[in-house]
Image (cartoon, rainbow, N blue to C red):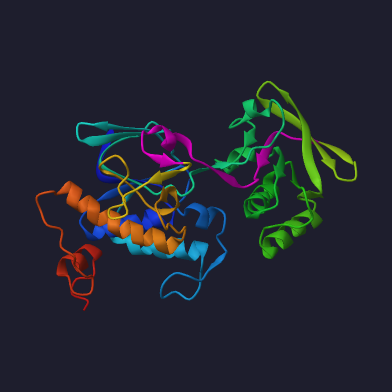
Amino acid sequence: MTIETDALIVGAGPCGLFQVFELGLLGIRSDLVDSLPAVGGQCSWLYPDKPIYDIPAVPVCTGQGLIDALMKQIAPFNAGMHLGEEVVELKPEGGRFHVKTSAGKQFLARTVFIAAGVGSFQPRHVKLEGIDRLEEKTLHYRVREPGRFRGQNLVILGGGDSALDWAMALAPEAASLTLVHRSDQFRAAPASLAALRALVAAGKARIIEFGNATAFRAEGDHLREVTIRQDDGTVHVLPADHLFVFFGMSPKLGPIAEWGLEMDRKTLKVDVSTFQTSMPGIYAVGDICDYPGKKKLILSGFHEAALAAFAAKAFLEPDKKVHLQYTTTSPLMQKRLGVAGEG
């Protein structure tokens, strides 16, 4: 089935989410696609607890707090959310854009907004020769169906929130669980570390610090052992039915570079009056776009999203004048926001 939409937004970080809002105010329905399994981009996945001080009228908020507020703000517009999917193909088709995702989903969009930040985020891989063939079998960079790991020997690499959260979740029902971190300094919340150490004290888990995976043994697609070497030379051969790697995420520009849009290094060139790219009907906002004087700030991305929305409205309805209306006084905008009559 092909999904038809007025606007397809590629990227569900803060700029992509605010793009939903600006389009919604103008009566333009949108769908979002993001390679990550949840909205938020860098704010949620890399800096959820990082304080942000430069959002107008918000003295301070966290990265996750900003995303939560944006999700509340765009709720009236019921945007379609298509997460855990990467856009792999985009081509013009009969005055619209045919878009295909890595999950096989297809869209026919009247306009496209690229809000992909510095690219789609991909997990940082463990560097063990030949282990990639086990990915999604017994090597995992994310956890799906956690129930299938009951009674298994599990090894987790990493020292951040994801590593510790999953260690705590999986340890109680695992045959064994060992968390390996290359340092004794953990990036996770102190409460999470304390909870995991309590599981260690209860004999439900094990922590190896200053350790790195150096080898593995598998039989076909089934992992059997992981070898860990500590900085002092101590070697541990751990029984392992599954290996989980949580080294964080790294950006990759990916297929965007293949869409025929004018680029400058790894950014898209835009017209600063419309934020349209070199292809009419395709716009770019946030860190992915570049122009003279560009500043990579969330604040700047919000401004870009507003201008891009007005430009798209004119593109979609070329015979109509686009009027500037204010949410404080426009009955139409208040109706779209679901607040009509509240004032």
Instruction: Judge from the rendering whether residue 195 lies leftward or rightward of residue 6; answer left or right.
Output: right
Estimate the x, y position of residue 189 in percent, counting from the top left: 66, 62
Q: Position of residue 91 (x, y in %)?
A: 31, 32
Front-lying residue, 238 or 173: 238
Vertically, is 320 above or below 124?
A: below
Specify start and end residues of the magenta stretch as a single range.
Answer: 238-264
The x and y percentages for residue 39 are: 45, 52
Q: Quadrant of the N terminus?
A: top left
Closer to the camera in the image, 307 or 264 = 264
Q: Nearer the viewer, residue 102 or 96?
A: 96
Position of residue 96 in the picture relative to residue 160 (left or right)? left
* Residue occupying the point 69% across, 50% down: 172
Say if the magenta span includes residue 258.
Answer: yes
Residue 226 appears in the figure: no
Q: What percent of the width, then of the height, locates residue 324? A: 18, 65
Does the magenta-highlighted stretch encompass residue 135? Answer: no
